[in-house]
Image: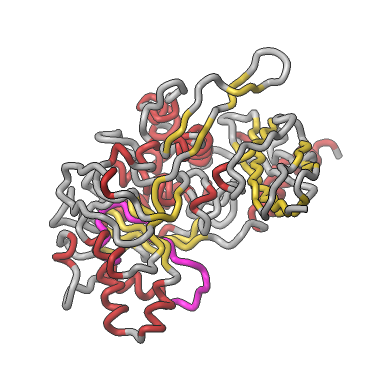
Amino acid sequence: MKVISILLLPFLSLFLCQTAFSQTNAKNRIIVLSDIEADPDDAQSFVRLLLYANQLDIKGMIATTSVWQKTRVAPESIKKIVRAYKSVQPNLNKHEPGFPEADELLLTVKQGLPQYGMLGVGKGKDSEGSDWIIKMLEDNDPRPLHIAVWGGVNTLAQALLKIKETKTESEAKRLISKLRVYTISDQDDSGIWLRNTFPDLFFIVSPGDDYGSTTWIAINSQIKGISNEEISNKWLSQHIQQGHGLLGAAYPDVSWGMEGDTPSYLNLIQNGLNNAEHPDWGGWGGRYELYKPDFSKQKKGSSGVPFESETRAIWTNASDNYTPFVPNDFGRVIKLDSSQYNDNKATLWRWRQDFQNDFAARIDWCVTEYKNANHPPIPVLKQPEEITVKSGQGFGIDASDTYDPDGDSFSYLWFNYPEAGTYKKAVNVSPENYNNVWITAPVVEKKETIHIILKITDKGTPNLSRYKRIIVTILPK
């Protein structure tokens, strides 16, 4: 009987992992527009994207132009990475269910016109890429369609122009309302055209081409006062590129910056923290607020894309006031660091070690058996994730049923995320590292919300984190 029990343990762990995964929300649909071959970072982002192909519903991977590659598209380079994924897909399914067949993904690889910006938009400028976007929008699927733009956006511009010219006003409005666009800065002159022409289009962007002021640049920026090891070339070589099968080997060396395009889809990954419909709540891909940027404070880059003011509100850069927790040698195992940060980059890099470790673990899955790999912990709350309390009322949150599918030890971390709620002052959460906490709601004069984040981190290799976001509505007395 003992032998049978031991043999069943890996299968039980896999069952628990699959059950927890199957209970998550519907996958986010995504189409990627990529100027692949303009910079190695697009290939890097595709490698990571395919490792989440079971958590995302990849509807298209479209090769496009950009200001950095004006007359060429390279769909074959996307297909090459998908074929590398094909060699590891069976092993990935041993760790989490639902990784699609590579042949299915290859059918979604399309191309836009090999023309720059608005030169590729207009009568007779349709492409298989723009037609594919329309086809996916017209599918009888109620889910939003996310467009992650890693280069120029003219293939989407052509699709929306055709919709505008061939559909009724109400039908065009319905289709466009399904879109959620995240552009990694403006890399051609069709981005500002899209925002001006379709004022209701959901659009996340750090506008212009001053990359140094963007949120997304934090994925590869060296931040003073913290360890930046997880974005070093040595780390990438050891944990991603070498010894992880053909998909890891397909991850090229950095030439300009590591994975500048990846933030466009990090907030679509279901980890308990991210919420694609609420960019202002913050997550792995950063935090963004809806407003009209002050053009006088923007800086012009050197790419040559248009530099002009926005005509309407867009989802764009927001700042977090962030103090990291750091290890403590004695007593409570964590403490607040002495360093504080307050800028838009902190909204992204504060999660960077978490998503880099997650990347490393998933690429391990390409070549390892289940029992030899690490898998994320499963946070479990005994209360709903949405709570309503009265002003000044005390309340508890209990996560003591949390578990790890590998049987690893794990740590708790609770904290208030003031910027995500309407009540912007910090709320004390104590103790920060126990399985349950007691919180006293602030005294309010109008209805307010606060966001409490639970982060569970296991002690496997590499350490993996998952989250719960508890939204507390506070009513005045």
- Identify the residue shown where x is 43% and y is 36%: 343
Residue 194 shown left or right of residue 469 in the figure: left
The foreground one among 453 and 229 is 453
The x, y position of residue 312, in whole percent, is: 34, 61
Residue 31 shown left or right of residue 297 in the figure: right
| One can see residue 72 in this view | yes
| Residue 424 in the image: above or below residue 28 | above
The foreground one among 182 and 210 is 210
Q: Quadrant of residue 125?
A: bottom left
The x, y position of residue 114, in whole percent, is: 16, 61
Residue 388 shown left or right of residue 77 in the figure: right
Q: How many marks?
A: 0
- Identify the residue shown where x is 50% and y is 51%: 280
- Identify the residue shown where x is 27% and y is 67%: 157
Q: Quick one: which residue is furthest to the top in this view?
A: 330
The foreground one among 458 and 173 is 173
Q: Quick one: which residue is furthest to the bottom in this view?
A: 168
Magenta stretch containing residue 190, yes or no?
no
Work out which quarter of the rendered image holds the N terminus and state it.
Answer: top right
The foreground one among 95 and 377 is 377
- Identify the residue shown where x is 78% and y is 37%: 438
Residue 31 shown left or right of residue 428 in the figure: left
The region drawn magenta spans 139-156
The x, y position of residue 245, in whole percent, is: 42, 39
Q: Quick one: which residue is furthest to the front in this view?
A: 445
| One can see residue 455 in this view | no
Magenta stretch containing residue 154, yes or no?
yes
The colour scheme is: secondary structure
The x, y position of residue 158, in whole percent, is: 25, 70
